[in-house]
Image: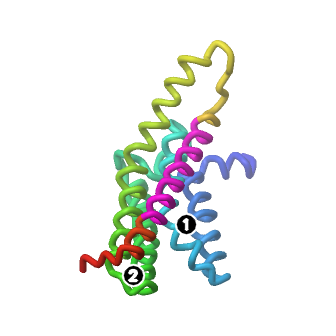
Amino acid sequence: MSFVNICLSIPNLDTIIFYLIFVIAIPATLFSSSDFETLKYYLPALVMLAVTLTESGKPNLFTNLYPQQITNFSSFLSRNIINGLALIGLLTQAILIALATNNLTLGLATGLITFTITFPLAQQILPFFINEFDLWAHTVFSRYINFPGNWHLYFIGILFGMVLLGIEYILLTNFTKYIISSGVNII
């Protein structure tokens, strides 16, 4: 048996590679370069990336990375590690903004917006959007374009993830301007 065949027969190799690159290497690089500003936004975005890879890789790739239905311990552990990292980034972002502006309302609004985009929208809307786009693309373009693999699903998932991050950025900047300019302080 060749080395390549042995490597490809390792279960969850795709999930292991994801963790090595996106959960260990990139955060370690950001942490060692003291780029905490990027890190606190990167960690919640991991959920969107994991959802995209899991939905787009079906049925063969990334099945245990971030599944909607948890079927084994590996998928349970993976999903909760990614959720935990996203929560750490989300809480860090909200707390640091509240401390920097001395405005707890701004910190709460930031946390609520980031939480809403990261969890309910990314976990529910993103898979729906990917699956509907796949159905639409195969219905409309199947005569003209061959879709080898799932490259179109990865592309649309990453694109829609960027749209969600853009919406989050717009909401955060507008709420920040509004709360600071109006002096709203609920708490």
102 with respect to 7 (left or right): left
Q: Is mark 1 on a helix, strand or loop?
A: helix
Q: Say which amino acid is labelled 2.
A: Ala
Was residue 171 drawn as part of the magenta stretch in this picture?
yes
146 with respect to 176 (left or right): right
Q: Which of 40 and 172 is in front in this view?
A: 172
- Dominant secondary structure of the magenta stretch? helix
* Residue located farthest toward the front when viewing the structure as drawn: 182
Quadrant placement of the C terminus: bottom left
93 with respect to 28 (left or right): left
Q: Which portion, as a residue range, is magenta?
A: 153-174
First reached walking from the N terminus: tag 1 or tag 2: 1
Nearer the camera: disc 1 or disc 2: 2
Q: Quadrant of residue 21?
A: bottom right
Above or below for 73 versus 148: below
Q: Is mark 2 on a helix, strand or loop?
A: helix
- x and y percent of residue 105 in the render? 32, 76
Residue assigned mark 2: 98
Q: Give the colour scheme of this rendering.
A: rainbow
Q: Say which amino acid is labelled 1.
A: Tyr
Residue assigned mark 1: 42
Query: What residue lies at 44% left-to-right and 78% top-to-bottom?
Result: 92
Density class for disc 2 (Cα within 10 Å; few <14, some 14-19, many ≥20) is some
- x and y percent of residue 163 in the render? 53, 48
- x and y percent of residue 131 in the render? 47, 33
Density class for disc 1 (Cα within 10 Å; few <14, some 14-19, many ≥20) is some
* Residue located farthest toward the top when viewing the structure as drawn: 143
Q: Nearer the viewer, residue 127 or 68?
A: 127
Above or below for 59 versus 7: above
Above or below for 78 versus 8: below
Q: Nearer the viewer, residue 2 or 17?
A: 17
Was residue 122 drawn as part of the magenta stretch in this picture?
no
